[in-house]
Image (cartoon, rainbow, N blue to C red):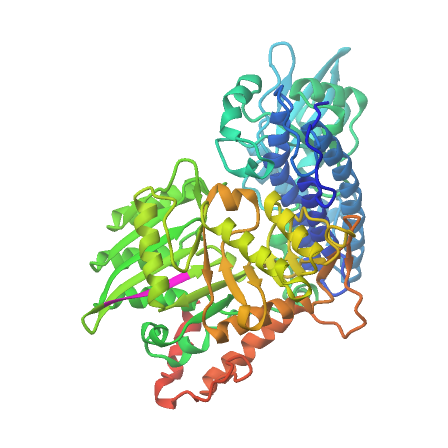
């Protein structure tokens, strides 16, 4: 085992095990008493999907590093790749045991509600006949069973694709049979008219698999799913481990096959002979075999909601929530006119991304608008934003789109959208070879009163209409000319390959963002007990920033962190981090905003950004952070953070030993996401009535002019569109 020569800090922990703790929190949501059963089943499916991607990316990377001779130990903990993999495999095995127990508990509760996920042997005669007919008509005709022997070598098993494997015997000779589960199959078959009794298609496939090998005796059988190393290209993932990944790629690729297997999941424990056979053929160690008593493919959990009888939905699923338009979208005839005078924050999914899309559509149609520039990382299928940008270009606007083609798993989708935008007349820029453009910035430039004006939008999340209903995010829109000037310079720079631009307001990685954050941490640390830092993000891994936070804590500054996923700083450690508290929220919506607040009162500085405090975001990506100057909106950002800190149902507190525990504050139950849903509903109703929520607009004395509200049909039209 390779040794790390530098002694790691005692207040940092391993990134990979921290991520597994996050996925454990996702799994834990499946059995919380306030979570409806159908939603609980989805959490198990999300846990499994997360784990598959984790193996493809992170376990794949660590497996690569074991092939190299140099020291690739993790900087934060000193653990070698081999040691990390050993701990990962042991922990994942425990998590599968927990997953199976949670799934069984949910299944029992489903049956209490007269919803039956059935084994074939539980079916009555009529139901068995229906299943058999379905197999013969819809599954068997598209199966391709194959024998593996001397003449037919072991085939390539696709990544994350379920197969049946059979150990066979004929005339004293041993063979193996393989059958791939057909892709594109509907996940469940209902066997009753009421749609309360169903069989997983996976189980039907498994039940009849042995009948495909009629001349053979079946000695053993299993469903398996192989996870393969992601097809790695030079990326920014490993900046967090202080490794120049590009420098290692040629060495790695010489030593491993493309898409090497990194794990195998089976629906039962394999016999020693079958495990030995698969180990030999796939190059897997015994530690890389996992088994589960739950379905291999859990994606059926998402299809049930639309397939079960309507009488079951209210009991088993969350009450639907529709994001609301913000007040200005209700009562202002022109959002451009409104933004000229008022900064605005949209809070997804409580408020609708449609309000931002309305702004883009208005810009597309406004004869005074000269240009629209935007950075795009991920988009929804059939994106309304793409439609609006195409229409703007077709109407003569100068539309520039910086499309990131290295957005993992969305590469092909972004290429297709680039072509659509290009054909509509947009200018397409593809960013940088070595730096992903992960920022979310949009700039509208228009002419009014013989002068050029700007509207700038900076967001914490993607321009994706689908995820804007599932992820919490903030979208800041301003007519501030200084921010507009910075955004103009930003687009000039990124479109001409300049990464170290100078800005008066905006922060940009990989150059100005991290130094400014460190400067503000030190400023608060210098205040001693009066220092105050409150940060919300997805992940915290950056070595230098964690060192600075520890130093500020040692000087007495109070530091609160809301970190949804990976958090490599250990809070509450005497002499290092005793003034740091960390919480994580996993709930109905995926927490996604990044808000960085430093100081109090006159010294308070607030940024919203697309960047997590990870080395990859700080040093290997193009990110933007925008200051919030407007006092009302700074109040809102602080209010947003404080409200999340009050959550004592979905929040968990990180302990010194690395465990996450529920918040036991003795107060009445409070769920931050539910509060913001109710708040959005109330604000929308007030907007329809021509009122402004005075509690959220500090110091506002102005009532909305009824003549400026627009007509109710505008709202009706909005909901028809959505």
Residues shaded magenta? 452-457
Identify the residue at horizontal 46%, vertical 89% (top origin). Answer: 701
Is residue 197 toward the left or the right of residue 520 in the image? right
Q: Position of residue 80 (x, y in %)?
A: 69, 29
Q: Is residue 110 visible?
A: yes
Is residue 476 toward the left or the right of residue 425 in the image? right
Q: Is residue 129 visible?
A: no
Q: Position of residue 703 (x, y in %)?
A: 44, 89
Q: Position of residue 388 (x, y in %)?
A: 32, 60
Q: Position of residue 499 (x, y in %)?
A: 38, 44
Is residue 55 toward the left or the right of residue 690 in the image? right
Is residue 251 toward the left or the right of residue 338 in the image? right
Measured along the vertical axis of the image, is residue 248 above or below residue 362?
A: above
Residue farthest along the left direction in this orientation: 450
Q: Front-most of 321 and 208?
A: 321
Q: Front-most of 372 and 577?
A: 577
Measured along the vertical axis of the image, is residue 622 above or below residue 149?
A: below
Give the prevailing secondary structure in the magenta stretch. Answer: strand
Quarter of the rendering containing residue 292: top right
Q: Front-most of 101 and 250?
A: 250
Quick one: quadrant of the N terminus?
A: top right
Quick one: quadrant of the C terminus?
A: bottom left
Task: Tell whether position 557 is magenta.
Answer: no
Measured along the vertical axis of the image, is residue 441 above or below residue 643?
A: above
């Amino acid at each position: 085992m390779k040794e790390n020569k530098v002694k790691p800090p005692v207040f940092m922990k391993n990134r990979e095990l921290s991520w597994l703790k996050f996925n454990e929190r996702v799994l834990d949501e499946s059995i919380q008493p306030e979570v409806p059963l159908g939603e609980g089943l989805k959490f198990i499916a999300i846990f499994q999907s997360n784990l598959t991607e984790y193996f493809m990316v992170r376990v794949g990377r660590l497996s690569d590093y074991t092939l190299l001779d140099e020291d690739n130990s993790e900087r934060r903990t000193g653990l070698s790749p081999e040691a990390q993999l050993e701990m990962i495999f042991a922990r994942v095995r425990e998590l599968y045991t927990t997953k199976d127990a949670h799934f069984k508990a949910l299944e029992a509760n489903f049956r209490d509600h007269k919803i039956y996920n059935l084994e074939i042997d539980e079916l009555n005669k009529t139901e068995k006949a229906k299943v058999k007919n379905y197999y013969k008509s819809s599954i068997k005709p598209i199966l391709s069973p194959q024998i593996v022997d001397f003449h037919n070598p072991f085939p390539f098993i696709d990544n994350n694709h379920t197969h049946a494997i059979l150990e066979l015997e004929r005339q004293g000779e041993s063979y193996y049979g393989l059958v791939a589960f057909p892709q594109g199959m509907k996940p469940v078959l209902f066997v009753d008219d009421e749609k309360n009794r169903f069989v997983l298609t996976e189980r039907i496939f498994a039940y009849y698999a042995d009948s495909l090998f009629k001349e053979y005796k079946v000695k053993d059988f299993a469903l398996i799913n192989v996870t393969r190393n992601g097809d790695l290209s030079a990326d920014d993932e490993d900046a967090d481990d202080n490794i120049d990944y590009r420098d290692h790629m040629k060495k790695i690729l010489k030593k491993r096959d493309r898409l090497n297997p990194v794990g195998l999941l089976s629906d039962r424990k394999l016999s020693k002979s079958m495990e030995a056979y698969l180990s030999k053929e796939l190059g897997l160690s015994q530690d890389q075999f996992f088994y589960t008593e739950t379905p291999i493919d859990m994606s059926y959990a998402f299809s049930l909601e639309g397939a079960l009888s309507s009488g079951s939905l209210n009991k088993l699923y969350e009450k639907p929530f529709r994001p609301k338009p913000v007040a200005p979208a209700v009562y202002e005839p022109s959002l451009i006119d409104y933004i000229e005078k008022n900064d605005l924050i949209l809070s997804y999914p409580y408020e609708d991304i449609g309000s931002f899309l309305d702004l883009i559509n208005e810009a597309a149609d406004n004869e005074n608008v000269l240009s629209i520039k935007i950075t795009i990382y991920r988009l929804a299928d059939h994106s309304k934003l793409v439609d609006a940008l195409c229409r703007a270009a077709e109407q003569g606007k100068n539309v520039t789109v910086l499309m990131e083609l290295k957005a993992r798993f969305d590469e092909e989708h972004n290429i297709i959208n680039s072509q659509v935008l290009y054909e509509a007349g947009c200018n397409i820029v593809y960013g940088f070879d070595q730096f992903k453009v992960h920022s979310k910035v949009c700039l509208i430039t228009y002419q009014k009163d013989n002068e050029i004006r700007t509207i700038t939008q900076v967001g914490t999340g993607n321009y994706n209409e689908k995820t804007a209903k599932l992820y919490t995010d903030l979208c800041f829109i301003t007519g501030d000319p200084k921010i507009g000037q910075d955004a103009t310079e930003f687009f000039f720079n990124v479109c001409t390959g300049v990464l170290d631009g100078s800005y008066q307001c905006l922060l940009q990685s990989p150059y100005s963002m991290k130094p400014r954050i460190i400067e503000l941490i030190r400023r608060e640390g210098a205040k001693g007990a009066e220092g105050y830092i409150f940060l919300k993000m997805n992940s915290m891994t950056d070595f230098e920033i964690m060192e600075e936070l520890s130093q500020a804590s040692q000087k007495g500054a109070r530091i609160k962190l809301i970190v949804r996923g990976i958090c490599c700083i250990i809070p509450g450690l005497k002499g290092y981090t005793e003034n740091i508290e960390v919480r994580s929220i996993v709930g109905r919506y995926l927490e996604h905003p990044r808000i960085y607040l430093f100081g109090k009162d006159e010294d308070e500085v607030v940024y919203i950004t697309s960047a997590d405090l990870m080395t990859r975001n700080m040093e290997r990506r193009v990110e933007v952070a925008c200051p919030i100057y407007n006092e009302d909106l700074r109040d809102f950002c602080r209010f947003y953070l404080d409200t999340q800190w009050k959550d004592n149902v979905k929040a968990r507190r990180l302990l010194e030993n690395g465990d996450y525990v529920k918040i036991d504050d003795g107060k009445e139950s409070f769920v931050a996401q539910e509060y913001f849903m109710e708040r959005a509903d109330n604000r929308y109703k007030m907007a329809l009535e021509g009122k402004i929520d005075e509690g959220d607009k500090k110091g506002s004395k102005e009532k909305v002019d009824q003549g400026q509200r627009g007509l109710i049909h505008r709202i009706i039209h909005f909901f028809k569109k959505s």
